[in-house]
Image: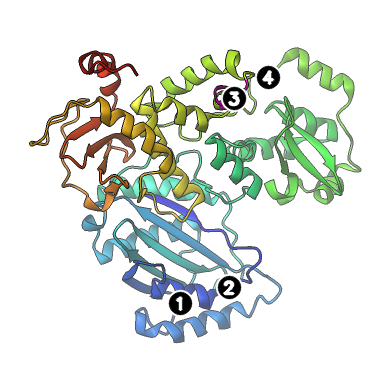
Amino acid sequence: MIARRLPKDAKIADNFTALGKYIAAAQEEGEKLDQFWIVGCDAGDELGDLDVALAEIEAVRKHKPETKNKSYHLMVSFRPGDKEKLSAEALKNIEAEFAAALGLQTHQRVAGTHINTDNFHMHVAYNLVNPKTLKMAYPRHDFKALAKTARALEQKYGLAIDRGMTDGMERGREGLSPEAQDYERHTWQQSFQRYMLDHKDEILKGIGGAKSWQGVHVSLAAHGVALRKRANGLVFVEAQEGKQAMKASAFDRSCSKPALEKRLGPFEVMKKEKAAGIVQTGSGRRYKARPLLRGHPATGQLWRRYLTAKKPLARRPGLIGRAMANWKLFLLTEAYNDPMAMVLILAQQEMLNLLLGTGQASVKHVPKTLEGPLAYWQKLAPAQTGRATPQMGRTKPSMSPSTAEMMKDYRGNTFLPQRDGQGMVVGLLMKSADGRFITLDAGTTANRRKMQQELGSGM
């Protein structure tokens, strides 16, 4: 289960009525409305009461004309197979648990579950204006509350566990600039901005406890972060290379230039003697470009291989040099040497869909970048047909458990992801167009050399 706040497009005005009708209509292609309910409105709690309920909610919201954003859009994505475990009452209870975790249990909201062939998910639109007190609610550090609640609900209802795939990254795209999102999509590495958000509580505590600008600089240096003036504001930068940055006001409003100068006086750069002292003592805590998906069993070994090969080859011209400069390109290249790189690519793509995409995890089509490696490994497989017996790897295949997850390529091959107890892709079962079953998992690499010899392959 992945629960996250869907950020509002800054170019579009807050419109609770449109959001409520979107939830009720399930307007995405291939989707249909499964369950629907309303909470906190005198108008009623069913779909037929929606128009009156929305009018009631809008009347409450008019008491805060000066506040632009008065809605909170929550999305909860479930794993394949979870829907059958959840009754209508259980879904309402799950929504109520999230509302309580956000401090919105007394607020009006519209909720609905959407279903299609690939993904079962819940949308909830909360009115942030309390209907009784008429005060605004501002859920802070909500990503932690959502993650903690999701883990508890997975245990309570026996749902697939998403721990390891998103823990530490629950903010999704919220708080990340478009540049940081692009960096993560193109490299599959943690951006500096995500590092800042992951350590937000500690960093804010240090800044808040500082009595001077020099104190602020010293507290940030403990995290490998520098504070610099840029244009009319302030930015945080990674202290070592300074290639990535984050607006201080985007990190937290208390870190904006006006807010800090009101408390500490006019901005001061770090004094040279302070900087020299920090360099001498050193700090082991700093931003490093680590893999986004660190909970996968294949990440550790492949990442170590990447770091080992990166140093001597990063400056080489051509494809090899470019691959060593980028974790994503390295995996695409390594997929010809290790099928677990190919498996990790699929797991990474699912995680990106959840964090930076629409919230739908499953990959519907085989990525074009994997067609070459898949054809290569198919060529190595023994030419047998008939029973669904794995010719490579150790996982006993079954093509029946989750047909919604099946993928196909243009050659007519069918693929089914094999998942572990946390729901991550750890293997791939392939049924080729000629009827062969091929399992690509951690056991495949060990058999690679033997298969090459038997087939007389010169690859």
**What amino acid does circle 4 point to?**
Ser
At 37% across and 38% down in the image, what residue appears?
371
**Helix, strand or loop at disc 4?**
loop
- In primary-sequence order, the first of circles 1 and 4 is 1
Measured from the top left, where is residue 75 in percent x and y? 44, 59
Would you place residue 104 above or below residue 196 in this image? below
**Helix, strand or loop at disc 1?**
helix
At 19% across and 30% down in the image, what residue appears?
395
Decide whether residue 53 is among the magenta residues.
Answer: no
Q: Which mark is residue 318?
A: 3
Mark 2, Cα crowd under 10 Å, few <14 / some 14-19 / many 20+, is: few
Mark 1, Cα crowd under 10 Å, few <14 / some 14-19 / many 20+, is: some
Circles 1 and 3: CB distance less than 8 Å?
no
Magenta-colored span: 317-322
What residue is shown with label 2?
A: 133
- In primary-sequence order, the first of circles 1 and 3 is 1
Measured from the top left, where is residue 167 in percent x and y? 45, 39
What residue is shown with label 1?
A: 21
- In primary-sequence order, the first of circles 2 and 1 is 1
Disc 1 versus disc 4: nearer the observer = 1
**What amino acid does circle 1 point to?**
Lys
Q: Which of the two residues, 86 or 7, is positioned nearer the viewer here?
A: 7
What residue is shown with label 4?
A: 283
